[in-house]
C-alpha cells in the first residue's frame, strides 16, 4: 500500500505537541505513557489501539507495565514522523478517554 512519506515539518510537530502536551518527541518518535485506573482497563485500551492501528495499517510499539501503557510512534518507511503518527496518537488519546469513562 502506497502512503505519503512526507515527514512532518518542525512547525507541524510543534503544533501537535502544543495541542497534545502529554505526548513527547523522544528519540525521533512520538511517545506517551497512559496510566489506567486498573490493569484490565489498560488492556482494553491496548485492544482498541490495536484495532485502530490495524485499520490504519500503522502499528505503534506498545509496552504494557501493569496499569501503564506506553505507545511509541514513527513511520519507519519514511525515516521519521509523518501525519500518520500524529493521527494515530490523537486517536489513541480519544480511545483512552473513552475506555476510562466506560471503565
Image (tube, rainbow, N blue to C red):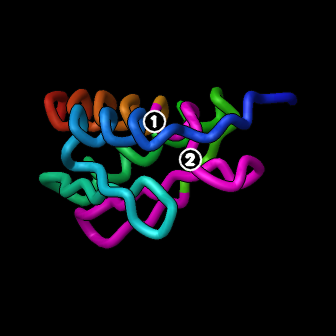
Front-most of residues 28 and 31: 28
Nearest the viewer among 12 and 99 is: 12
Alpha-carbon span between mark 1 and mark 2: 8 Å
| Other-residue count near label 2 (Cα within 10 Å), few / some / many at <14 / 14–19 / ≥20 | many
Describe residue 20's horizontal placement relative to residue 60 as left or right. Answer: left
Q: Residue at x 51, y 52 (%)?
A: 73
71 sits left or right of 60 in the view? left
- Percent across and percent down for residue 97 are 21, 32
Please tell me which residue is depicted at 25% across the width and 54% down the height of the picture: 34
The answer to whether 96 appears left or right of 91 in the picture is: left
Question: Which of marks 2 and 1 precedes in the sequence?
Answer: 2
Residue at 65 percent across and 35 percent down: it is 54
Q: Quadrant of residue 84?
A: top right
Rendered location of residue 101, percent (x, y) = 14, 29
Position above or below: 24 against 75:
below
As drawn, the label of residue 81 is: 2
Does residue 81 belong to the magenta stretch? yes
Residue 95: percent from left, percent from top = 33, 31
Q: Dot 1 lies on which element?
A: helix
Where, quadrant-wise, is the C terminus in this rendering? Answer: top left
Q: Which mark is residue 86?
A: 1
Check contact, mark 1 vs mark 2: CB within 8 A: yes
Quarter of the picture containing the N terminus is top right
- Is residue 83 rendered magenta in the image? yes
Which contiguous range is marked in magenta?
A: 61-86
Mark linked to residue 8: none
Label 2 element class: loop
Amino acid at each position: 500500500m502506497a502512503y505519503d512519506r512526507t515527514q512532518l515539518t518542525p512547525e507541524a510537530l510543534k503544533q501537535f505537541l502544543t495541542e497534545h502536551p502529554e505526548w513527547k518527541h523522544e528519540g525521533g518518535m512520538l511517545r506517551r505513557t497512559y496510566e489506567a485506573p486498573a490493569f484490565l482497563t489498560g488492556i482494553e485500551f491496548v485492544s482498541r489501539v490495536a484495532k485502530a492501528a490495524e485499520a490504519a495499517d500503522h502499528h505503534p510499539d506498545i509496552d504494557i507495565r501493569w496499569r501503564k501503557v506506553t505507545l511509541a510512534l514513527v513511520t519507519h518507511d519514511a525515516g521519521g514522523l509523518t501525519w500518520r503518527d500524529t493521527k494515530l496518537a490523537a486517536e489513541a488519546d480519544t480511545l483512552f478517554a473513552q475506555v476510562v469513562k466506560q471503565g
